[in-house]
Image (cartoon, coloured by chain):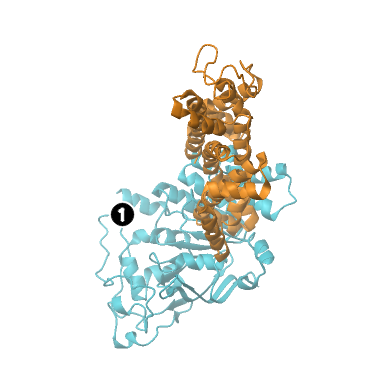
Chain colours: A orange, B cyan
Amino acid sequence: MSERVLTQPGRRRSSAMPAIVRENAPVVLGLAFIVLFLAASFFAPLPYGPTTPDPLATSQPPSALHWFGTDANGFDVFSRTIAAAQRDIPLALAGTLASLVLGIVFGLLVSTKSRWSERAIRGLDVFQAFPLVIIGTAIVTLTGNRLESVVLAIVLLNVPRFMRLIRSEALALRESRFIEAARALGASPLRILWRHILPNVMGITLAQSSIAAAHSIIVIAALSFLGVGVSPPDPSWGLMIQEGARQMIVGDWWIVVFPGFAVLVTVAAFNLVADGLQAAADASQ
Amino acid sequence: MPIVQVRNVSKTFYRDRGPGVRAVNDVSFSIEEGETLALIGESGSGKSTVGRLMLRLIEADDGEIVFDGHDVRRRSPEELRRLRATMQVVFQEPYESLNPRMSIGAIVGEPLEIHERGLSGRQRAARVAEMLDEVGLDPALAGRRPGALSGGQQQRVGIARALITRPRFIVLDEPTSSLDLSVQGQILRLLQDLQKRLKLTYLYISHDLSTVSYIAHRVAVMYLGQIREIGSVDDVVNRPQDPYTRALLNAFLSPDPTVRTRDTYRLSGEIPSPTQVQRGCFLYSRCPSRIEPCASTPADLRQLDPGHEVRCIRAPLSQPLVTVNPELRTFGGPPRPTQKQQA
């Protein structure tokens, strides 16, 4: 990394993103997969309508006609697995992006070593003690079953994690010599947060956000499983797994395995991006 | 007229429990404009804390810090912020004192963003280039990150950042101690050169006596938060009158194996915990010249000669004093000692 810095001194900032991608095959691979999957869910011609059941072909095993088989209602599992990305991936990304922004703002706000911020963190402890099921049920009871409540659930789960991460990083940074130098220059607390602390926590925060996106897919699946968020007949990996799980008893494994595999590879793709971003952040330090 | 005056300043650090650490204990001194006062002492003697108190990077418990007629401790946050353009600091660890995510140009230009907001980006870049040139750096380095620079270059960036707002007083907190010996000399010469050209006043904090006698005009020796001895470099280094100063000079090793000037004047034991309140002289437990009254009589600074103050009640010490290693005065200096070293 340092060698390129030497050969093109002035262009360090502008070339940062492509350089990260160029040097990190995993990031490219992960992003490409996510984009392709999302594009396919919207534009690819599917063999069957994802919300139109075929009552004459229920519980068919995978075949040339139905690649991933059909479920108990006669829905084509392949079409639904692809189409589910339409909702699952944007929901996960929206939830993660909102968590990222709110987490950065609140994380920086509590990143002082004051009694006030200690209390805020203690408050988060209490909040985080509630499991997802309880939070999901509470949100739906309070706001009704809408897609937005899924985003809200993701935000409520992820913001405390971002806050903790940013706070612990920022507290360590505050002890560093260059922050003291900035104070000696007369930099205001806001300038110190914005110019000195934020850029130095961004790397690890971005990496955490990819992990959060992966986690969100699981949250959406879990919430759908509980009947929150995406409602039938709209396809969602979580719902498909829920229905498929029931059919496992009679041996219809394909209904649950293929959407489960879709969750697996999507999470893996987000993790690839996360690992790559983390590595890039470390290398440039 | 001194540009900086420190009067009876004290600072105690408290931990969650237990007694506080009295890091700085009733310290007073002043620095004339264009002068370099060196503050020396071993680790934990409170010398860096004095520097931070003077810049109000930490708050003093007691005393007055007068800079250019302003009591620094009484300035409002806004007044203090404006005052910071005129008093600056260069730290020991050059890399750690530079934000790794900022370019050299942004680092050196930041003080201008804070203190001269009227400047356009272009004007700022011009000033940065000028400043980089002034500290001996290629202005083309402005686009790089600190990690791409050598230790000596990083320290030059630190100096450029400190000087770009044209301050009058600089705290140099061991600016060369983490650098190679050859680079140390370059940085010291740069600092000396800048002092002459820009009429800067320095507080030079160090534990390296050779650099002190090279760059400083006067020296203050600190031990357990107190000044033991203060005076001209000549007085303190060549005619030390305090047992602590004498022992400190003796502990200094010469790079020349033929120089055998160390006498056996040594302190015994370890530096006492600064949490323990001492009665009498702080050096009592370790001092080779102690007498009975030292244990109970507080030792106060008193003037021995004009401009030379000592804390020891027995000073001037009766024993023949150390012949101080001549190398002490010759770091990076005139060619004579260099030739001698090579011989």
Out of A282 and B3, give the one closest to the viewer.
A282
Looking at the image, residue B330 lies above or below residue A245: below
The percent position of residue B175, horizontal first and vertical second, equals 47, 55
The percent position of residue B266, horizontal first and vertical second, equals 27, 71
Q: Which residue is mark 1?
A: B255
Looking at the image, residue B259 lies above or below residue B143: below
Task: Please state if B90 lies on the left or on the right of B316 as rendered.
Answer: right
The percent position of residue A140, horizontal first and vertical second, equals 63, 46
Residue at 69 percent across and 45 percent down: it is: B124
Out of A187 and A6, give the one closest to the viewer.
A187
Q: Quadrant of residue B163?
A: bottom right
SS type, badge 1 = loop
- Residue at the right extreme? B118
Out of B40 and A249, give the one closest to the viewer.
A249
Task: Please state if B98 lies on the left or on the right of A230 as rendered.
Answer: left
Q: Mark yes or no: residue B80 visible.
A: yes
Q: Quadrant of residue A16?
A: top right
Task: Please state if A198 lies on the left or on the right of B177 as rendered.
Answer: right
The percent position of residue B28, horizontal first and vertical second, equals 51, 76
Instruction: Tell me the amino acid under the disc marked 1.
Output: Pro
Q: Mark yes or no: residue A24 visible.
A: no
Looking at the image, residue B263 lies above or below residue A150: below
Residue at 58 percent across and 29 percent down: it is: A18
Tag 1, which chain?
B
The crowd level at tag 1 (other Cα within 10 Å; few <14, some 14-19, many 20+) is few
Q: Quadrant of the N terminus of chain B?
A: bottom right
Looking at the image, residue A171 lies above or below residue B297: above
Image mark count: 1
